[in-house]
């Protein structure tokens, strides 16, 4: 993976997270969710999603110096997927929401590939 590709990957990861904040803020109802911006924990979740996007942007600006953020991002993305899919299997989350987190699966895999290929 070239430096340009690496930067593009993490900048796209940041945009994905920021887009997720926008989607969850504006389209929560069609996704079968309570609008997150209307309650305390929803606001905290939106802030966390946004902050992780900032972290991915930081990785894009200096991948080698921010490898720890990549590891944290992989764990958080897979954790979100596990939570959403568990709720989907229990009937507490919509299929749209379960599908939406496929982006997190893809980014987790791409982030892991970056770590493996760039290991010293």
Image (cartoon, rainbow, N blue to C red):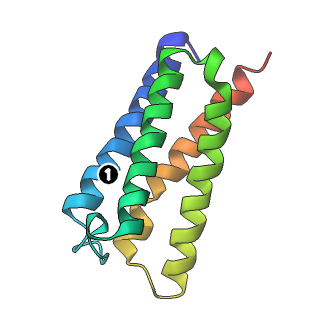
Asked which secondary structure carries label 1, the reply is helix
Viewer-proximal residue, 48 or 70?
48
Nearest the viewer among 58 and 98 is: 58
Q: Is residue 108 above or below residue 90?
A: above
Residue at 41% from the left image edge and 35% from the top image edge:
14
Residue identifier under label 1: 21
Quadrant for the N terminus, please: top right
Give the residue drawn at x 59%, y 51%. Answer: 76
| Quarter of the figure that contains the C terminus | top right
Check the image and report above or below for 64 versus 36: above
Tell me where residue 82 appears, x and y as whole percent. 60, 66
Q: 55 above or below 63?
A: below
Q: Residue lying farthest top? A: 3
- Please provide percent x and percent y for residue 68: 68, 31
Q: Residue at x 32, y 51 (%)?
A: 21
Q: Residue furthest left?
A: 26
x and y percentages locating residue 85 in the rendered image: 54, 72
Which image quadrant for residue 44?
bottom left
Q: Tell me the residue at 65%/49% (across/down).
A: 75
Q: Nearer the viewer, residue 42 or 18?
A: 42
Q: Quadrant of residue 65?
A: top right
Res 66 quadrant in image: top right
């Amino acid at each position: 993976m070239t430096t340009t590709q690496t930067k593009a990957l993490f900048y796209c990861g940041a945009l994905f997270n920021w887009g997720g904040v926008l989607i969850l803020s504006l389209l929560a109802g069609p996704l079968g969710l309570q609008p997150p911006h209307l309650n305390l924990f929803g606001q905290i979740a939106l802030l966390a999603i946004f902050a992780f996007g900032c972290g991915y942007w930081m990785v894009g600006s200096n991948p080698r110096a921010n490898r720890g953020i990549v590891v944290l991002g992989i764990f958080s993305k897979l954790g979100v997927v596990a939570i959403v899919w568990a709720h989907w299997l229990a009937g507490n989350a919509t299929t749209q929401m379960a599908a939406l987190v496929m982006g997190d699966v893809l980014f987790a895999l791409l982030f892991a590939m970056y770590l493996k290929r760039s290991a010293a």
